[in-house]
Image (spheres, rainbow, N blue to C red):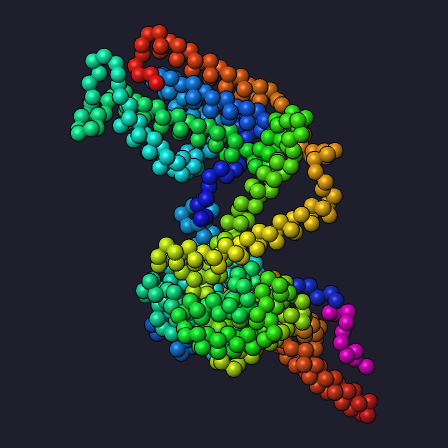
Amino acid sequence: MKGFAFGQYYPANSVLHRMDPRAKVICAVAYIVASFLCKNTFSFVLLFVSAFALILISRIPLKVVLRSVRALIFIMAFTAVLNIFWIVDTAEGAVPLVEFWIIKIYTKGLYHAAFILVRILAMVIGTGLFLTYTTTPIALTDALESLLRPLAKIKVPVHAFAMMMTIALRFIPTIMEETEKIMSAQKARGADFTTGSLAKRAKALIPIIIPLFASAFRRADELATAMECRCYHGGEGRTKLRILRYHARDFLGMLWIILFIAAIVTLNILGARFGWLYTM
Amino acid sequence: MTPFINVRKITIIKKTKTPRPNPSAVGTENGAAPAVPIMNQTENPKIRLENINYYYGKGTPFEVKALDAVSLDIHGGKLTGIIGHTGSGKSTLVQLLNGLARAGEGRVLLDGVDIWADPKEIGRVRYRVGLVMQYPEYQLFEETVYADIAYGPRNMGLPEEEIQARVHEAAAFAGVDAALMEKSPFDLSGGQKRRVAIAGIMAMRPEVLVLDEPAAGLDPQGRHTIFQGIRDYNRKTGCTVLIVSHSMEDMAQYCDDVVVMAHSRVLMAGDRDHIFARADELETVGLDIPQITKLCLLLREGGMPMPAGLYTVEAAEDSLMKLFSEAKKNRRGGERS
């Protein structure tokens, strides 16, 4: 449980860290769109290279970034395998690479599997680098609140959502720590979570879940009191300590993403015209 | 007439820094002793820690050495206090004793047998060494106080009448009122919850009872009740008890032996009289010594012949009165001549 690292802020001194969180949210969304626009080998190669370029720019160790990828290995492997077996090349003269019983594997299938892998990898790395790794959770919710503000006109409680998200993020590590403590305490009383039938193991979790809920409610209660003591009354008329401002680097970042999308679209069109390699 | 106490001299005393004392000074080396001399060594210790090194996050840039070459004996049947600052390694130490944590280097011997000799049997060790963690009231979960205290014994697979006997015995030791037995533990006050949680461990009748800060966050009256109950338990059952605390005051009052932790090491260990005789050393590592000990030290430094290592108000009063009557006698003798 100590190794829980998905979406944790990693402090470093880089342009990505200094960018305005709103610009980063926009870039992250654009990056996902870009990864879906990729159509042929060349654009996927560009996408792949860009993901690693982002890691270099962010100055976050490769090992740290790959840790969040590791959590998705199962999904990646599953989709890759599915593609390898599912894709049937309907082009004329296409011969299966391997033919065995009802299984037919085409070269196209292998390419598709590779494409999907690159796409998932790029999405995870891209969003991670733009958002969770380089942006503190507080800055992120600030950005979301600011970007979603127009929705407040149609009575969407944007501030309340942002506050809920901030609090939820803030308490994840606290509750993890608490879980570990309660587990130790119950183990000291002879609780056993690892042996026995499934029903027995599920029952063994009760001594953890109940104290955990009790303490979550107690914390919520205390937090509410503490917020009221400091006159919290929702978003109305609330000012900010740190006001978000766009700088040149933010516009440059967004410009970079636009150019990136343009490059991918160009590669797609050229690929379609000249029949380059495999396309999706 | 010479003044009884030279007040002016006391107020200008500067704290002199003495070099950090060598931890090996207390422990005595034995023939087949491991690399580090064992502190507080005894024949047939209840628990022996041998050359323990414990790291957090080993192999990462965030590696922290929580315990550094700890070798220590815990005497059977005694009430031992473990004192140290936050981060001195005392909470880590107690988690090693019942196998909640396992040291990378070194051994933990319970009655001379390595507790990790058979890792599958570590559950049995946890019944023999009962650990009450910090803020144990947050681990209560059952519908009634009775059921919660019975959780440990039930996990041990004891028959129902045995469980019942143990629950009532433990409740009496921990000071849980019999009238509370059918209440929900969530309806109790903080101090009551704490006592129920302690009873929950006592009901397992461990050979060693370890309590991590059992009185943290309680008022003086609550502290006293808890410590008194633990001491009674120790005296009546003969069970070895360890208490982790950062309060010298409490340790001086209730413990037989004291282990002082500082900077991940055992700084000194021994019986209470020995440790408090070295109160000045405790002060140099920044530990709070009991206020009465501090006063006696100041008096000594001010030139009064007070005995070293006083830690109870009664003992200090006695020796002060003795000095006072001696001084009176001398003065009278002086006037006469």
Task: State which quadrant residue B96 falls in.
Answer: bottom left
Q: Is B227 situated left or right of B1 in this image?
A: left
For the view shown, which residue lies furthest in the bottom direction? B336
Q: Is residue B281 visible?
A: no
Identify the residue at image location x=49%, y=61%: A185
Question: How far across and how far down the image is residue A232, in percent?
Answer: 72, 42
Q: Is residue B3 visible?
A: yes
Residue B255 vertical position relative to residue A22 in the rendered view, above or below: below
Residue A247 vertical position relative to residue A241 in the rendered view, above or below: above
Residue B220 vertical position relative to residue A48 in the rendered view, above or below: below
Question: How far across and how far down the image is residue B43, in percent?
Answer: 40, 78
Residue A169 vertical position relative to residue B337 in the rendered view, above or below: above
Question: How far across and how far down the image is residue B55, in percent?
Answer: 43, 54
Q: Mainly helix, strand or loop, the magenta region? A: loop
Question: How far across and how far down the image is residue B67, in percent?
Answer: 46, 59
In this rendered view, identify the residue nearer to me: B50 or A75.
Answer: A75
Q: Can residue A113 be found in the magenta stretch?
A: no
Q: Give the total of numbered labels.
A: 0
Identify the residue at image location x=64%, y=31%: A156
In this rendered view, identify the residue nearer to me: A222 or B248.
Answer: A222
Identify the residue at image location x=52%, y=76%: B168
Identify the residue at image location x=79%, y=78%: B3
Q: Which residues are magenta?
A: B1-10
Q: Is B295 situated left or right of A104 in this image?
A: right
Q: Check the picture and name the quadrant holding the C terminus of chain A.
A: top left
For the view shown, which residue lies furthest in the left direction? A100
